[in-house]
Image (cartoon, rainbow, N blue to C red):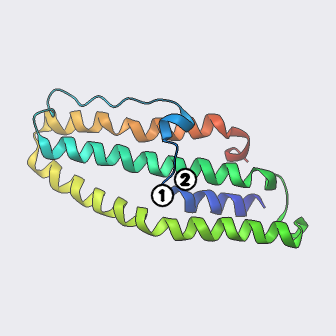
Amino acid sequence: MKKFLFLLVAVALLTSCGGEKTANDKLGKLNVTIPDELKDNKEVVEFIDNMVELSDEYAILLDETLEKTQEFNGKETEDLSMLEQMKLMKITGEVAIKSTSVMAKWGEALEHRTQLEEQLSDEEIEALESVYVHFEKRMEQIQEKYGEITNE
């Protein structure tokens, strides 16, 4: 079961979904400050906003997936009832379907990042790197909320 939950979490890392609650609502508020070196560059500001949105979508899906699978924590797959197995398969299927769009978005974002960095000075690239901390902080929030599951 531990391997299955790890696989489920790994798939969720590459997925997104829309939801009524924001990542700030579900996990705690995180502010992103755009460095002064980048504030006047409209394309970079838009890129940063899109990356924040994408990392928050990912965090929401991961949060919802871990929330939905908590009842299976510590159970081996072979010990689940048929109904529990069906429920787990449904959750897994939903995550797999939702992953398609976010994987495409991540690919596009990484390509765009490379193109942007080619146009920026070293100082601007360093300033842009400071914004990527947002994603790491979201993952720390997931770890804090679901530590007992994610540490298995």
Residue 69: % across, % down: 72, 55
Occupied quadrant, residue 125: top left
What residue is at 21 percent from the left and 28 percent from the top? 35
| Left or right, 74 with reference to 53 | right
| Left or right, 20 with reference to 119 | right
Q: Secondary structure at mark 2?
A: helix
Q: Are marks 1 and 2 in contact (CB under 8 Å)?
A: yes
Residue 68: % across, % down: 70, 53
What residue is at 18 percent from the left and 44 percent from the top? 44
- Real-space CA distance between mark 1 and mark 2, rounded to the nearest whole angstrom: 5 Å
Q: Secondary structure at mark 1?
A: loop
Instruction: Check disc 2: other Cα within 10 Å, few if <14, some if 14-19, many if 20+.
Output: many
- Identified by mark 2, the residue type is Leu
Q: Where is 35 relative to 67, above or below?
A: above
Instruction: Check disc 1: other Cα within 10 Å, few if <14, some if 14-19, many if 20+.
Output: many
Question: Closer to the camera, 116 or 56?
Answer: 56
Question: Closer to the camera, 80 or 74?
Answer: 80
Q: Which mark is residue 148?
A: none
Residue 74: % across, % down: 83, 52
Q: Which mark is residue 61?
A: 2
Q: Residue furthest front?
A: 20
What residue is at 41 percent from the left and 66 percent from the top? 101
| Left or right, 67 with reference to 83 | left
Residue 54: % across, % down: 39, 51
Residue holding disc 1? 16
| Left or right, 53 with reference to 97 | left
Give the quadrant of the N terminus. Answer: bottom right
The answer to which of marks 1 and 2 sits earlier in the sequence is: 1
